[in-house]
């Protein structure tokens, strides 16, 4: 019997008061930082060294992230080039009652860089 595939988040983080506005909803800038962190974790693993974010498409919230929610970020590799990787980063919020709601997804591109900040091939280890 085959077991179902379990999707594991690349990053899980709780929305704390410092991430929210006066109404208890997470600010978009905080979420963008978490998206960048999740994407760079995967891209750095692939690149075996530092990466730089070079592009992020527009993103739109379908549901708010509330104070206390656990935010799950999932990363899927869409394209791997010689120097860059394009990722789809999906975000869901886990409410305090356990409900999961889809929040947004973005397409982001990361480029492998050397210690001087110049682009390098993904296969080169820094």
Image (spheres, grey):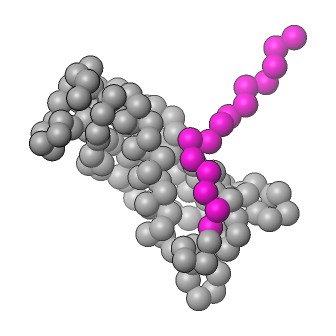
Image location of residue 2, percent across then percent down: 82, 14
Q: Of residues 113 and 60, which is closer to you in this image?
A: 113
Which residue shows up at 48% across the image and 67% down it? 30
Is 6 part of what is drawn in magenta?
Answer: yes
Instruction: State left or right for residue 85 relative to residue 22.
Output: left
Which residue shows up at 41% across the image and 52% down it? 36
Is residue 82 something one can see in this rendering?
A: no
Is 105 part of what is drawn in magenta?
Answer: no
Which residue shows up at 33% across the image and 42% down it? 109
Q: Quadrant of residue 20?
A: bottom right
Is residue 47 something one can see in this rendering?
A: yes
Q: Of residues 61 and 5, which is closer to you in this image?
A: 5
Numbered range of the magenta stretch:
1-15
Q: Main secondary structure of the magenta part?
A: loop
* Quarter of the image that includes the C terminus: top left
Q: Quadrant of residue 68?
A: bottom right
């Amino acid at each position: 019997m085959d077991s179902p595939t379990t999707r594991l988040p690349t990053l899980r983080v709780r929305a704390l008061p410092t991430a929210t506005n006066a109404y208890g909803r997470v600010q978009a800038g905080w979420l963008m930082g978490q998206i960048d962190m999740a994407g760079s974790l995967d891209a750095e693993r692939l690149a075996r060294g530092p990466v730089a974010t070079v592009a992020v498409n527009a993103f739109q919230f379908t549901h708010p992230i509330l104070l206390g929610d656990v935010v799950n970020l999932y990363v899927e590799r869409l394209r791997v080039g010689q120097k860059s990787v394009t990722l789809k980063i999906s975000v869901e919020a886990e409410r305090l009652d356990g409900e999961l709601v889809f929040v947004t997804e973005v397409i982001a591109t990361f480029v492998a860089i050397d210690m001087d900040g110049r682009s390098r091939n993904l296969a080169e280890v820094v």
